[in-house]
Amino acid sequence: MTARASVPLDKILQSQGFGSRKGCRALVEGGYVEIGGSAATDYSLPYETGGLAFSVNGEPWQYREKLYLALNKPVGIECSRKPSHHPSVLTLFPGQFAERGLQPVGRLDHDTTGLLLLSDDGAFIHAQSSPKRHVPKLYRATTARPVTPSLIESLLSGVMLVDEPEPLRAVSCEALDEFMLEIVLEQGKYHQVKRMLAAAGNHCAALSRVAIGRLRLEDLGLAPGAWTYLDEGRLSMLAPA
Ligand code: URA
């Protein structure tokens, strides 16, 4: 998703999260920015942004028009930009990403782990979060009490949650062992898995999201807390079935 455009260097740096236009000019004038192995000295010089590689203070960067990221979210992290009890998910990324408006696509609870998407592309975030978009999300839940056939049956046939006009049902649900199940949801209501398990008479002791659409966390090879850029191939795996 790289646009072909010729853009002045100070504007490029600003778009990539290196601060104000004035601050970016100072970075260039201070000799902190290198392109093609030599210091860039003219901040007004236009560069082709597609595929542009540069370094700032010795750190290499690749120009990206928009950010599309996948994180293996660890426990003890809040998805809010202004967290109340735990560090924000944005602390797991370079500061430049927050500067350019990176935010999570939907939320996972502070104690939920697993696949979380983040982007600074408002249209992408909006489209992915739309209730009309039926992208299956696969969760693995550890339960406090044994998983029974009647629990599975209730989750599949639908449970009533407070403030929801209609029962919410799982697209699929199966026991992995006595205290673990996999559940697929197409909605993303607040605490949905935990509330559905409680409404069905059990309790969620631990929760992890293992896939969104056809994008599976295990295929990304990310340790807890690690993240990666998503290329177009992987983004296409987020399309509704
Ligand atoms: N359902 C929950 O209960 N919590 C999450 O974090 C995600 C889905």
Image (cartoon, grey):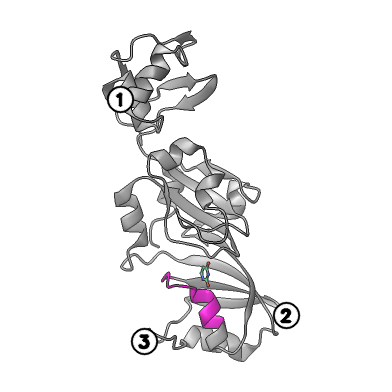
Q: Is disc 1's CB within 8 Å of ligand 1?
A: no
Point out residue 89 in the picture as x, y percentages from the top left corner. Answer: 52, 51
The residue pinned by badge 1 equals 11
Q: Earlier in the sequence, mark 3 or mark 1?
A: 1
Point out residue 11 in the picture as x, y percentages from the top left corner. Answer: 30, 25
In front of the other: 204 or 169: 204
The residue pinned by badge 2 equals 178
Q: Is disc 3's CB within 8 Å of ligand 1?
A: no
Within-10-Å neighbours for mark 3: few <14, some 14–19, many 20+: few
Point out residue 143 in the picture as x, y percentages from the top left corner. Answer: 66, 78
| As drawn, 93 above or below 39 | below
* Amino acid under disc 3: Glu
Residue 40 visible at all: yes
| As drawn, 159 above or below 182 | below
- Residue 92 appears in which quarter of the rendering? top right
Q: Nearer the viewer, mark 2 or mark 3?
A: 3
Q: Is residue 187 left or right of residue 5?
A: right
Q: Nearer the viewer, mark 3 or mark 1?
A: 1
* Amino acid under disc 1: Lys
In front of the other: 11 or 143: 11
> What residue is shown at x 47% (from left), y 8% (from top)?
38
**The stretch drawn in magenta includes residue 188:** yes
* Amino acid under disc 2: Glu
Q: Is residue 188 left or right of residue 57?
A: left
Within-10-Å neighbours for mark 2: few <14, some 14–19, many 20+: few
Q: Earlier in the sequence, mark 2 or mark 1?
A: 1
Q: Label 2 vs label 3: CA separation?
A: 29 Å
Q: Earlier in the sequence, mark 2 or mark 3?
A: 3
Q: Which residues are magenta?
A: 186-197
Residue 49 visible at all: no
**The stretch drawn in magenta includes residue 92:** no
